[in-house]
Image: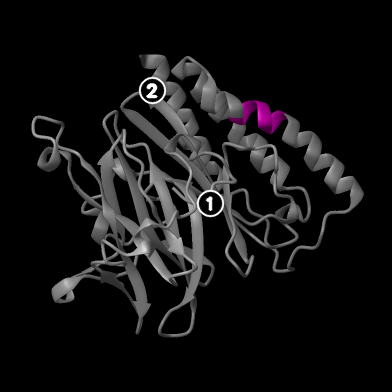
């Protein structure tokens, strides 16, 4: 057990050190030349092996060791000039999310410590010729009142991001909706709708712009549900809003079952109006054809795959 804590401390320490691995630069990146492309593809060979080890290694110690090796290897690969344009197609279990304006991208992945514990790792890379990279340090278990907290890169609500959507705030600055998945515990999962903003290139997570009934606001929205369920939480292009499964307690429909939340069959959501993502209690009438429409989705077990459109 002592080795477990030492190894985990090394991983956490290294992730903090990545924050200093930045090279000042403001020149927007260009496509990679042949030499740079060959260099980063060679690096990806190693990254693909390590990333797979993080996901599928049988022993927790081996998964942690692979994660420990993955972080510096990824930073080294990203130091390749103009690396922003390389999409790492072989890193299937590392999510890489881009906003519409491609000003930056977010890497995120999951490390399973045990059946009841997960840790998350990530980084934001700016679209520049020289590397500008800031790590995301998972402090989920230390965050008080997470639905109402302003968070930083060193105090991050760790998730695997599976979606990103830009929007204009009331001051006309670009903000971003983030959609993330958290393995959470053995019996429950979580999906998070968060807000990412930048001030002088400094990232901040959360903003009091999710408005519910009676004027109540939150900085982020967290859906917690049973591990055997699959729910939808994402922006829907057709409806021009965030669409989410409405959840109810499993005990209310199956007495004697675990007290966890499950999808009920209808949809709620959030629509952007006058600077707020306003809660919509019923997106479609329960008997409407739209209520049965199949939203793009993938099962929770595929959350680590970069190609996932939704969860």
Residue 203 image offset from top left, x and y in percent: 47, 63
Q: Position of residue 278 (x, y in %)?
A: 29, 74
Vertical arrangement, residue 161 with respect to residue 289, above or below: above
Q: For this view, does 65 lie left or right of residue 187?
A: right
Q: Quadrant of residue 190?
A: top left
Magenta extent? 46-51
Residue 5: assigned label: 2
Does 242 sit left or right of 255 as displayed?
right
- Which of labels 2 and 1 is toward the front? 1
Name the residue rendered at 52%, 39% in the picture. 304
Q: Is residue 180 magenta?
A: no
Q: Residues within 10 Å of mark 2 (few under 14, many from 20)?
A: few
Q: Between marks 2 and 1, how big is the CA–CA gap?
A: 35 Å
Report the residue at 17% width, 76% height from top. 215
Residue count near mark 1 (Cα–Cα under 10 Å), binned few <14, some 14–19, many ≥20: some
Q: Position of residue 127 (x, y in %)?
A: 67, 62
- Relative to 71, say whether 296 is above or below: below
Does residue 50 show up magenta in the picture? yes
Q: Reading the chain from its start, which is encountered first: label 2 or label 1? A: 2
């Amino acid at each position: 057990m002592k080795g477990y804590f030492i190894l985990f401390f090394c991983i956490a320490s290294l992730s903090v050190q990545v924050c200093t691995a930045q090279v000042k630069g403001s020149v927007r990146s260009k496509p990679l030349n042949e030499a740079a492309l060959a260099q980063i593809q060679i690096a990806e060979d190693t990254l693909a092996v390590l990333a797979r080890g993080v996901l599928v290694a049988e022993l927790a110690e081996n998964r942690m060791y692979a994660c420990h090796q993955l972080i510096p290897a990824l930073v080294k690969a990203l130091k390749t000039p103009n690396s922003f344009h390389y999409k790492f197609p072989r890193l299937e279990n590392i999510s890489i999310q881009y906003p519409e304006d491609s000003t930056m991208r977010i890497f995120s992945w999951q490390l399973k410590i045990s059946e009841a514990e997960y840790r998350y790792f990530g980084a934001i890379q700016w679209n520049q010729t020289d590397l500008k990279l800031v790590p995301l340090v998972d402090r989920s278990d230390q965050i008080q009142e997470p639905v109402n907290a302003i968070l930083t890169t060193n105090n991050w609500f760790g998730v695997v991001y599976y979606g990103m959507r830009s929007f204009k705030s009331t001051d006309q600055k670009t903000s971003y909706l983030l959609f993330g998945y958290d393995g959470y515990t053995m019996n429950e999962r979580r999906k998070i709708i968060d807000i990412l903003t930048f001030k002088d290139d400094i990232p901040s997570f959360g903003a009091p712009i999710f408005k519910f009934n009676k004027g109540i606001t939150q900085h982020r929205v967290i859906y917690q549900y049973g591990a055997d369920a699959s729910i939808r939480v994402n922006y829907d292009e057709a409806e021009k809003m965030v669409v989410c499964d409405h959840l109810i307690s499993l005990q209310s429909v199956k007495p004697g079952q675990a007290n966890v939340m499950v999808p009920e069959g209808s949809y709620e959501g959030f629509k952007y109006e006058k600077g707020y993502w306003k809660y919509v209690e019923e997106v479609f009438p329960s008997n409407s054809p739209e209520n049965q429409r199949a939203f793009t989705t993938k099962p929770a077990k595929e959350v680590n795959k970069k190609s996932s459109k939704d969860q």
